[in-house]
Amino acid sequence: MKRIRRGIVRNTAVTLGCLGRLGLLAALLAPAMPAAAQSAADFPNKSIRVVVTFPPGGSSDAVFRMIVPRLNEKLGQPVIVDNRPGAGGNVGLSIVAKAPADGYTLGLGAAGALSANVSLYPNMPFNSGKDFKPVAMLAAIPFVIVGHPSMKAKTLREVIAEAKADPSKLSIGHGGNGTAMHLSAALLGQMAGAKFTDVPYRGSGPAALDALGGQIPLAIVDLPSALQQIKAGKLIAYAVTSPQRLPMLPDVPTVAEAGLPGYDSTGWFGIVAPAGTPAPIVARLNAEINAALSDETLKANMRNLGVEPAPDTPAAFDAYIRSETAKWAKVIQTAQIKLD
């Protein structure tokens, strides 16, 4: 009887010891296993910093600041804008690439830093395809090809024919070397088989002013820089660079409609997070941003700035960034574009 009791006690002790060790192991593993899920479940529980890669006052900065009050309300935490311009967006996004992947540091990046810069800068501080998780596309920025009213050519087809007839005759102004407008001009020439002389400016506004004054025959500029002059008949609007016509210029054809099928060149910007940010956090942010972009008043205000709302899924935004990167790499290489 004593032996049986001792056996029971010994077996019980062994069992309890194993259970104790299993319990200790479970206790050690428990905090680690659900950490990501737990962080996503209570996200956000503090302020969110969004590094905007442009100075205050630009169209991308202005658009995001329109969205901020709605995000503050829906997320229940303040969204803080941190403007970090420089090196075509590389400065700001390099901060985001090194941030913890917890959803509390995001970046607002554009076509340059997220797609074209890898082909323009010899030493990039990040790899846009590996170091970021696309969260949400915000907007597309279409451009318009304009000319001085003294131009004989009244359509884009006629402009292209004129450029082919005398490659040294037509110059085209744009917002600066390596900008989306510059790349749009390069793509135009390549698809048309025509040669234009590039005239870089420090921004879209000065290029539009020189086209208005007749100092240059053509320019590719953003919509706000030329809209009033187009409506007043002081500039010819040959075509818009987007795949669809614009509500602000419904009678102006797209480049594709005007003679170059398949042409599509727009600026764009969106929100990215550090790679490894949990999918539920990305999904939550995407849903709230897309909901804000669906507001009719916000859409009207964005269009007044010359940008088109472009809500999308994280997967679609990721695919778009990759396709834009490959597209502009070819254009830049063919045109042998170099930064100043």
Image (cartoon, rainbow, N blue to C red):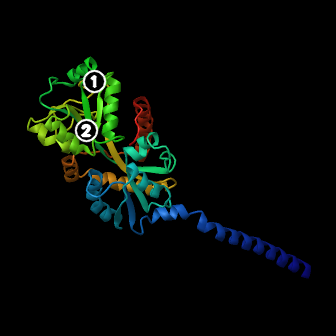
Front residue (pair 237, 177): 177
Callout 1 amino acid: Ser
Q: Residue at x 23, y 20 (%)?
A: 162
Front residue (pair 299, 59): 59
Quote the CA–CA distance across marks 2 and 1.
24 Å
Q: How many marks?
A: 2
Q: Position of residue 166 (x, y in %)?
A: 26, 19
Q: Nearer the viewer, mark 2 or mark 1?
A: 1
The N terminus - image quarter: bottom right
Category of crowding for the residue at label 1, using alpha-carbon neighbours closer than 10 angstroms: few (below 14), some (14–19), many (at least 20): few
In what element is the residue under mark 2? strand
- Describe residue 31's horizontal placement relative to residue 15 as left or right: left
Q: Position of residue 124 (x, y in %)?
A: 49, 47
- When asked about the image quadrant of residue 213, the answer is top left
State the residue lying farthest toward the bottom. Answer: 2
Front residue (pair 120, 139): 120
In what element is the residue under mark 1? loop
Callout 2 amino acid: Phe
Q: Which residue is mark 2?
A: 143
Q: Quick one: label 2 or label 1, which is nearer the N terminus?
A: 2
Evaluate whether residue 290 shows in this view. Answer: yes
Q: Position of residue 160 (x, y in %)?
A: 25, 22
- Describe residue 182's horizontal placement relative to residue 105 as left or right: left
> Could you say which disc has been placed on residue 168 in the image?
1
Q: Residue at x 18, y 39 (%)?
A: 210
- Describe residue 213's horizontal placement relative to residue 83 as left or right: left
